[in-house]
Amino acid sequence: MWNDAAAAAAACQRVPPRWSVRYNSVMDQHPVPLVPGRLVVISGPSGVGKSTLLRRLLEQLPQLVPSVSATTRPPRVGERDGIDYHFLGDAEFERRRAAGEFLECCRVYGRQHWYGTLVDEVVPRLSAGQWVVLEIDVEGTLSIIERFPGAETIFVMPPRSDELEHRLRHRGTESPEAMARRLEVAHRELDHADRYRHRVVNDDVEQAVGEIIAILRSAGLPAAPIGAPV
Ligand code: ADP
Ligand code: 5GP
């Protein structure tokens, strides 16, 4: 469990929705738009392999539409604005957060940088019947579960507890301080695995991708892509 649950909740913004669609009556307290598409969330601790699995899934499943998150973290070498993330300055992120433009947003890892899912990346596509996939952290997923209880949430688990450190070291994108923060958070995040609808161990990438595809097919993934919203 979170040792600092209050701080964690405060860090994670539950933003009231600004779009106008009909709401499902069961969820009046946490409005959920009644939309034909489906939300898929790939989540789990840093370094577990979420981005790797998502890349493979998108290659194999053109029916899945990725949501591009916004972040205040600087781009890494090779990352492109609008494709890997919408890279925003602190003031712009805050302006959009205050305007209710995020479905959820969090200060991830030691409260250093903001990350958030934009309403406009998700809701129009769900309304058009598409399956939208988010790759977000655990705290953000807990907000999404409140608002979209029907989401297919998938927690990616490491095969062994020391494997996250090994993978993050090998990826080589984090300073020693950032890596220590990510690992500390990761150990707390593992406690939330049972809040997710599905759990997949990422030992072998191909096997984990196969398991996720099987989960999505049995959840009713359409056989072919659905047209983009007009
Ligand atoms: P995340 O998005 O969860 O932070 P990444 O997808 O960036 O994690 O993966 C972290 C590192 O682990 C990368 O260097 C990636 O190539 C590697 N990796 C991912 N899945 C596996 C796996 N099943 N076995 C070994 N290494 C993996
Ligand atoms: P990175 O900096 O390595 O790209 O991502 C750091 C973490 O932020 C990852 O765990 C990733 O899943 C998470 N993240 C990325 N986008 C979002 C988002 O929109 N919302 C939340 N809550 N987390 C996100």
Image: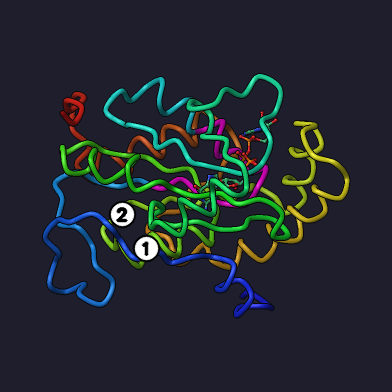
Residue at the spot 35% in from the left edge and 45% down from the top edge: 40
- Say whether marks 1 and 2 touch (CB < 8 Å): yes
Q: Residues within 10 Å of mark 1 (few under 14, many from 20)?
A: some
Q: Residues within 10 Å of mark 2 (few under 14, many from 20)?
A: many
Along the viewing direction, whichever of 136 and 83 lies nearer the viewer? 83
Q: What distance separates the C-alpha of mark 1 from that of mark 2?
A: 7 Å
| Image-based side of 139 in relation to 119, left or right | right
The verdict on residue 43 being magenta is yes
Residue at the spot 16% in from the left edge and 74% down from the top edge: 26
Label 1 beta carbon within 8 A of ligand 2:
no
The verdict on residue 156 being magenta is no
User: Is the residue 14 above or below the residue 37 in the image?
Assistant: below
Return the x and y of residue 160 as percentages of the image width and height.
70, 50
Count of picture labels: 2
Please, which residue is most extreme toward the right here? 176
Q: Tag on residue 145?
A: 1
Quarter of the image holding residue 176?
top right
Question: Colour scheme in the image?
Answer: rainbow
Q: Amino acid at mark 2?
A: Ala
Return the x and y of residue 52 as percentages of the image width and height.
56, 30
Q: Please identify the quadrant where the C terminus is shown.
A: top left
Q: Which residue is mark 2?
A: 151
Along the viewing direction, whichever of 55 and 148 lies nearer the viewer? 148
| Image-based side of 104 in relation to 192, left or right | left
User: Is the residue 215 above or below the residue 226 in the image?
Assistant: below
User: Is the residue 165 above or below the residue 12 in the image?
Assistant: above
Q: Tag on residue 221?
A: none
Residues in magenta, as a range: 41-53
| Image-based side of 51 in relation to 218, left or right | right
Which badge, 1 or 2, comes first in the chain's sequence? 1
